[in-house]
């Protein structure tokens, strides 16, 4: 579960506390087939899996995004050599926690290695949380933290005010922010980042958001050239009748032409919308539901505090999002959100 990864990185959660798994118990009334999807054929309405071919009357594609370290030359080697760590997988978050613990002096570079990526706040939360984990080593200046992103501001889809407020929060904390930095290579021997603008930056530890690509299975559906699946912003239907897509696998274009951020809060509300769409497609008499674009995300700032960005991303002409300053209350809201997910998937035995 994405939001818990940051707390695994911080050392506040153990992996066994935050794993969620779909099981027959958590999905009463649903036949659960566990398999790897090899190919989707929307022409013949068939999903080819490691467990046979499944036909369908309605299909919802929710294959997420795949991490592709190989997309940046030298990045895989840096991860293997231990010069870099990532916090986008459970193992990665645990290992990076240990690396941060072992760092006594030097520079941590938090790098967004490509866009789009899941949870636009996550790299900056990681910077805040690593600063808190370092404690005196960060406060004394023995360890510095700098963030690098190809975007002009953090969370650019939320608008310049939100981005500038987040930059101010980072700088107040003593964390550097470097915009428009598109990485072209990582040199793990020299511990140097190379950027498209010709500059280089040294690091002692690289904390990377790996490049994201569409899953091969989603790409096989042939619903777009890029492999990210274009969807109707309100119904999440694709260009093929009877096929929907939700969550990170999609590209949902907002009125300002930018894509909706990849976040669980949206995947979850889209699931409700599509459940109604599918039921109607199958002839059931249920009301139509539309995706409203409303959502909130939390920005952990360390020390059990979080800021909160909330608003409506489907507003025209541009998303209307407010960043509320850090408080213990928002951190507690995020804890409650995590508990709700864990409760839903790990302990529920009846239909929602
Ligand atoms: C560090 C971090 C922090 C985050 N924090 C937040 C947050 O605070 N709030 C928030 O809203 N979101 C957050 N997110 C984002 C959130 O986790 C994702 O947006 C969300 O999980 C998307 O859901 P999804 O169902 O689209 O994709 P996923 O959750 O990735 O699910 C896709 C599933 O498809 C499976 N799959 C892929 N290919 C195949 C195949 N070929 N065959 C079978 N199965 C396959 C995958 O194994 C996976 O289980 C965070 C993410 C990260 C990494």
Image (cartoon, rainbow, N blue to C red):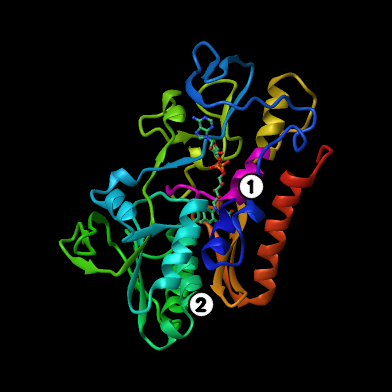
Residue 301 visible in the picture? yes
Residue 291 visible in the picture? no
Farthest bottom residue? 140
Residue drawn where x is 46% and y is 33% of the image: 229
Residue drawn where x is 56% and y is 20% of the image: 241
Q: Mark 1 or 2 closer to N-term?
A: 2
Which residue position is annotated with label 1? Answer: 292
- State the image coordinates of residue 61 (x, y, percent, origin top left): 55, 30
Q: Secondary structure at mark 2?
A: helix
Residue drawn where x is 15% and y is 61% of the image: 198
Label 2 environment density (alpha carbons within 10 Å; few <14, some 14–19, many ≥20): some
Which residue position is annotated with label 2? Answer: 132
In front: label 1 or label 2: 2
Farthest left residue? 198
Q: Secondary structure at mark 1?
A: loop
Magenta region, residue range: 257-271
Left or right of 59? Residue 286 is right
């Amino acid at each position: 579960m994405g939001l818990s990864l940051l707390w695994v990185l911080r050392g506040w959660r153990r992996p066994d506390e935050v794993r969620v798994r779909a099981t027959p118990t958590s999905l009463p009334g649903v036949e659960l087939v566990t398999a790897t999807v090899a190919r989707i054929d929307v022409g013949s309405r068939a999903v080819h899996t490691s467990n046979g071919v499944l036909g369908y009357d309605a299909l919802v594609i929710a294959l997420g995004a795949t991490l592709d370290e190989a997309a940046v030359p030298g990045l895989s080697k840096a991860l293997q050599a231990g010069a870099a760590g990532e916090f986008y997988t459970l193992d990665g978050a645990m290992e990076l926690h240990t690396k941060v613990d072992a760092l006594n002096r030097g520079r941590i570079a938090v790098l967004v290695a490509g866009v789009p990526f899941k949870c636009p706040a996550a790299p900056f939360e990681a910077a805040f949380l690593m600063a808190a984990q370092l404690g005196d080593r960060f406060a004394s200046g023995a360890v510095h933290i700098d963030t690098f992103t190809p975007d002009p501001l953090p969370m650019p889809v939320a608008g310049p005010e939100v981005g500038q407020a987040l930059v101010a929060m980072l700088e107040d904390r003593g964390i550097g922010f470097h915009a428009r930095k598109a990485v072209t290579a990582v040199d793990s021997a020299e511990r140097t980042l190379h950027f498209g603008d010709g500059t280089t930056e040294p690091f002692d530890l690289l904390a990377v958001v790996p490049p994201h690509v569409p899953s091969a299975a989603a790409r096989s559906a042939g619903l777009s050239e890029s492999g990210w699946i274009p969807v109707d912003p309100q119904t999440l239907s694709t260009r093929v009748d009877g096929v929907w897509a939700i969550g990170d696998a999609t590209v949902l274009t907002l009125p300002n032409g930018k894509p909706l951020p990849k976040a669980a809060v949206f995947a979850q509300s889209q699931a409700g919308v599509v459940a109604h769409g599918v039921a109607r497609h199958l002839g059931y008499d249920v009301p139509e539901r539309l995706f409203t674009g409303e959502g909130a995300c939390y920005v952990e700032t360390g020390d059990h505090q979080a800021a909160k960005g909330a608003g409506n991303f489907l507003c025209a002409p541009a998303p209307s999002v407010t960043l509320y300053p850090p408080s213990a209350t928002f951190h507690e809201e995020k804890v409650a959100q995590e508990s709700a997910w864990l409760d839903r998937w790990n302990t529920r035995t009846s239909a929602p």
